[in-house]
Amino acid sequence: MPATPATASKRHPFQPQPWRDRRIEIILGNLLRTGVLLSAAVVLCGAFIYLSRHTHEPTNYRVFRGEPSEFRTIAGVIQSVIDGRGRGLIQLGLLLLIATPIARVVFSIVGFAIERDRMYVAFTLIVLAVLLYSLVGSGLGM
Amino acid sequence: MTILEFTAIVAIVSFVAGLLGSLTGLGGGVVLVPLLTALFHVDIRYAIGASLVSVIATSSGAASSYVKEGFSNIRIGMFLEIATTFGALLGAFLATRIPTSALAVIFGAVLLYSAFVSRQPRPQALRNLPPDPLATRLRLNGSFPDEGGARSYNVQRVPAGFSLMFGAGALSGMLGIGSGAVKVLAMDQAMGIPFKVSTTTSNFMIGVTAAASAGVYLSRGYVDPGLAMPVMLGVLAGSLLGSRILVKAETKSLRLVFAGVILVLGLQMLYKGFWGKI
């Protein structure tokens, strides 16, 4: 980082501190990558089970039927994982994938709180509220 | 086609889409839905669900390498995410209510626009603009490493950018794409953010935006595990490889070819939508 926090804040009194922002960004970036690799690993495990059981069955995605409830709700997905179903494991991996950016938003709240940036804590809480509404309000949590 | 053949072919196609999308910077998600519907006769709703999941994967997977370059601005990102997440929620609810032929027409229009934008030179951010009072109050101005030290920038026209990002979020939620073309319009054109900053920041935002509509899609039964699995794994592997070789690759002719593919797919989506073949 060529600009040190001291010189940057001298020139721009309202500018956020680049060094602290950057450290938060690096932590967030690593969090995102870990989440993606974890969810990809879970999806891959599910794929092996699913493909080994249904290898030669025909596919049909021409007609939209919608997924059964076991693949549409968090409780249903967890139940089908317990039952040892490959597709349940794939859906669990996809749920982890959706959770990854949500975790990033939660960590951003902590980061902004450490910087005592109340305005951005509030902005981030709004984003988190929308994300949680989309998960709960859409019926996924049932 | 058996499940094993289908999975293998979809994974290969998704890998190539992810690789080309990452190398050209145009995103792989935008070609996935038309490819899945045209080549594999997948219902557009299943295709959108699978594509949306892959968009989260590529955005989050690339984030750590973008962050190391030190260009992204987390305040711009978080502020605009308010607009994109509300938009994504609206887009996802609209997608479950409007007919699939209308979805195809909107998708076709977005593809044509993306192909057009990819042939335009990216707008150069004007240097030494006076700080905008609203942007200053929102602490959006920043600096990034450039040749010859740190270069600071002042964000312009915040309300226009915010509104356009709401539209970008709505398209993303409706079509299961990252809608990079609209973000260029909002962040580069309207807000005057230098393109190195806008590219990395918008990549950071795409995952959060897509997560806002993914919950709706999953609970409505649009995300099929058998289809989403090869799409997500293929696109993720392709885009990770693409970001590794990006620095050295000559992308100019590649961009031209990919823009051509997007154009053809856009025309095909419009045709299908208008003639009700979807």
Image (spheres, coloured by chain):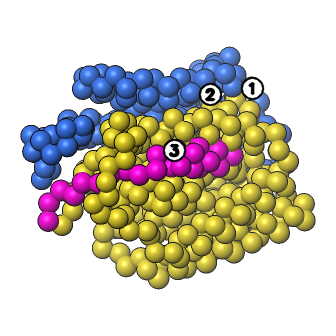
Chain colours: A blue, B yellow
Residue B210 screen position, x and y as percent: 56, 41
Task: Say the numbered circle drawn on residue B159.
Answer: 3
Sequence-wise, the earlier of marks 1 and 2 is 1
For label 1, the SS is helix
Q: Amino acid at mark 1?
A: Ser
Q: Chain of mark 3?
A: B
Instruction: Please say if B3 is above or below B108.
Output: above
Quadrant of the image for the N terminus of chain B?
bottom right
Instruction: Identify the residue under disc 1.
Output: A69
Q: Is residue B167 magenta?
A: yes
For label 3, the SS is helix
Q: Are marks 1 and 3 on the same chain?
A: no
Q: Nearer the viewer, residue A79 or B159?
A: B159
Q: Is residue A48 left or right of residue A142?
A: left
- Residue depth check, mark 3 versus mark 2: number of the one nearer the observer: 3
Identify the image quadrant of residue B126.
Answer: bottom left
Q: Amino acid at mark 3?
A: Pro
Q: Which residues are magenta?
A: B148-174
Task: Say the numbered circle drawn on residue A134.
Answer: 2
Cα separation between marks 1 and 3: 41 Å
